[in-house]
């Protein structure tokens, strides 16, 4: 069971920035992290990916909240839809943003805006089961 814990960064949002949460997870042996979109946007996507990778963490999800309760909920929801439409137009909808793997239909049906494949190991690439279940879209 070692390595099965993942931190949803909402639980430390008042105490830590995303960079601090990434460092804290690595320091305390928590191998998984599920950041929130606003935290990733604040840190910057490239910097967040780089930091998660360098700390050897697994991205277990990308969260968003305030669908109907946040002050700017309508704009945030429209932005999420626009981001998904851009991925559709670019032909990258259904492709893991970290490793270029196809995201399973089951995962996409559950959350159409999903941007990562299951069981992505940030520092080593997807684990063996995920690699066996998906064909890399980067190779052609």
Image (cartoon, rainbow, N blue to C red):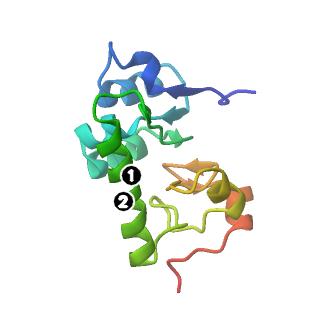
Q: Which of 65 and 75 lies nearest the eye of the viewer?
A: 75
Q: Position of residue 104 (x, y in %)?
A: 67, 62
**Labels 1 and 2 touching (C-beta < 8 A):** yes
Residue at x 30%, y 31% (from the top left corner):
19
Residue 100 horizontal/vertical position (percent): 50, 68
10 Å neighbourhood of mark 1: few (<14), some, or many (≥20)?
some
Quadrant in which residue 126 is drawn: bottom right
Q: Which structural element holds mark 2?
A: helix
Quadrant (top left/top right/bottom left/bottom right) for the N terminus? top right
Instruction: Work out which residue is located at the far bottom of the displayed protein and give it.
Output: 140
Q: Quadrant of residue 6?
A: top right
Residue drawn at (60%, 68%) of the image: 102
**Residue under pointer 2:** 83
Q: Is residue 67 above or below residue 1?
A: below
Q: Nearer the viewer, residue 16 or 14?
A: 14
Position of residue 71 relative to residue 15, above or below, is below
Q: Is residue 61 above or below residue 31?
A: below
The residue carrying mark 1 is 80
Distance in Å between CA atoms under marks 1 and 2: 5 Å
Which SS class for mark 1?
helix
Left or right, 25 with reference to 104: left
- Residue 63, image x, y percentages: 47, 38
Residue at position x 46%, y 17% in the image: 11
Label 2 crowd (10 A; few <14 / some 14-19 / many >=20)? few
Looking at the image, residue 118 sits to the left or right of residue 38; the answer is right
The residue depicted at 25 percent of the width and 39 percent of the height is 43
């Amino acid at each position: 069971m070692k390595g099965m814990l993942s931190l949803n960064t909402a639980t430390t949002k008042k105490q830590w920035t995303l960079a601090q949460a990434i460092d804290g997870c690595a320091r305390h042996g928590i191998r998984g992290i599920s950041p929130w979109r606003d935290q990733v946007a604040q840190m910057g996507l490239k910097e967040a990916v780089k930091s998660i990778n360098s700390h050897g963490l697994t991205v277990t999800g990308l969260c968003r909240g305030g669908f109907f309760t946040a002050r700017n909920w309508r704009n945030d929801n429209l932005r999420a839809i626009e981001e998904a439409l851009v991925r559709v137009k670019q032909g990258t909808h259904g492709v893991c943003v970290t490793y270029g793997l196809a995201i399973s239909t089951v995962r996409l049906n559950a959350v159409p805006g999903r941007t990562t494949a299951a069981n992505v190991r940030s520092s080593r690439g997807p684990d063996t089961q995920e690699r066996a279940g998906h064909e890399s879209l980067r190779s052609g």
